[in-house]
């Protein structure tokens, strides 16, 4: 794989890579390039090596010359296994997380603004690559289903990629049984919880409020200007700092079923029965969204 990073990189941007390595892996690499040619300067060279003394080598390359290697004698990847990897651009360097665990930060050796492309090669299969920009507002992800509130007309069933947050758009045709909304994104570092309110002129059929610092996901509704009973019971909380999430919200006859990263998270029984009037999705807070599909 060799492709451009549209808009380049800056502090706060994350690169999410989902893939797998074969049983007979020897090595693969991820390069962040300062141009779209393989001969471009390399701001980050990330190179896991399975060679009997498993390690990950970090380096950079300028003007055709490799610089000093950083060798981490630890291997976050397992042979024959799938993985999730996130590269977070910080003021210090490139912070690498694999399967939710911090691995290493490679300090900047050249300006991050020079990075224009990414290259991945070797013994690896890639399923997903997402470059997620950041917009922090000192809140947390808040997913709302609203009814009776007109917003700009949406894409009509087409996926939306990397929308800015706050996000507000129509759900074409409203909600109905078996309809699913997919939202993919990432909770950035520093995500916190604040009170979030919407105007009383709108009914909120389903309000989902992950509170990252408190480790909970609060659910509620607001009908006729009155908030209902909060629901907080949860077996797991997937909304954690630095974590990517893939969420689906399915509308059933009696309830919304919410799944995150393939696991059933909770059910929220309908408090507003007019499905087709639930026609707006809003997202606000400390969250980077890479994909939305109705």
Image (tube, rainbow, N blue to C red):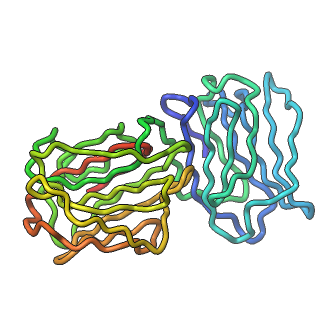
Q: Residue 265 placed where, x, y %?
A: 40, 71
* Location of residue 246 (image quadrant): bottom left
Q: Looking at the picture, does residue 50 appear above or below residue 280?
A: below
Write the residue at 88% across / 39% down. Answer: 69
Q: Residue 239 placed where, x, y %?
A: 48, 58
- Residue 169 placement, left or right of 140: left
- Residue 28 placement, left or right of 257: right
Write the residue at 83% across / 46% down. Answer: 57
Q: Quadrant of the C terminus?
A: bottom left
Q: Looking at the picture, does residue 86 appear above or below residue 127?
A: above
**Extreme-right residue of the structure:** 53
Write the residue at 79% across / 33% down. Answer: 60
- Residue 286 placement, left or right of 20: left
Q: Looking at the picture, does residue 209 appear above or below residue 262?
A: above
* Location of residue 232 (image quadrant): bottom left
Write the residue at 43% across / 45% down. Answer: 287
Residues 218 and 107: in front is: 218
């Amino acid at each position: 794989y060799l492709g451009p990073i549209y808009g380049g990189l800056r502090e706060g941007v994350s690169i999410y890579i989902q893939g797998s390595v074969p049983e007979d892996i020897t090595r693969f690499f991820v390069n962040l390039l300062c141009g779209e040619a393989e001969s471009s300067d390399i701001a980050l060279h990330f190179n896991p090596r399975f060679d009997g003394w498993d390690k990950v080598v970090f380096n950079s390359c300028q003007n055709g010359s490799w610089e000093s290697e950083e060798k981490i004698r630890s291997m976050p990847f397992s042979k024959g296994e799938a993985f999730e990897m996130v590269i977070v651009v910080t003021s210090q360097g490139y912070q690498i997380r694999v399967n939710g665990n911090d691995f290493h930060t490679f300090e900047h050796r050249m300006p991050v603004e020079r990075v224009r492309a990414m290259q991945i090669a070797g013994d690896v299969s890639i399923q997903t690559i997402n470059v997620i920009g950041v917009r922090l507002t000192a809140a947390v992800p808040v997913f709302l289903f609203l009814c009776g509130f007109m917003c700009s007309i949406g894409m009509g069933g087409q996926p939306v990629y990397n929308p800015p947050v706050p996000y507000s758009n129509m759900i074409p045709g409203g909600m109905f049984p078996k309809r699913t909304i997919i939202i993919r994104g990432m909770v950035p570092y520093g995500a916190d919880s604040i009170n979030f309110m919407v105007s009383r002129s709108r009914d909120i059929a389903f309000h989902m409020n992950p509170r990252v610092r408190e480790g909970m996901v609060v659910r509620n509704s607001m009908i006729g200007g009155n908030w209902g009973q909060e629901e907080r019971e949860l077996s797991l909380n997937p909304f954690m700092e630095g974590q990517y999430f893939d969420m689906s919200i399915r509308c059933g006859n009696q309830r919304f079923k919410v799944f995150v990263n393939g696991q059933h998270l909770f059910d929220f029984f309908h408090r507003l029965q007019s499905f087709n009037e639930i026609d707006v999705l809003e997202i606000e807070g400390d969250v980077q969204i890479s994909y939305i599909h109705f």
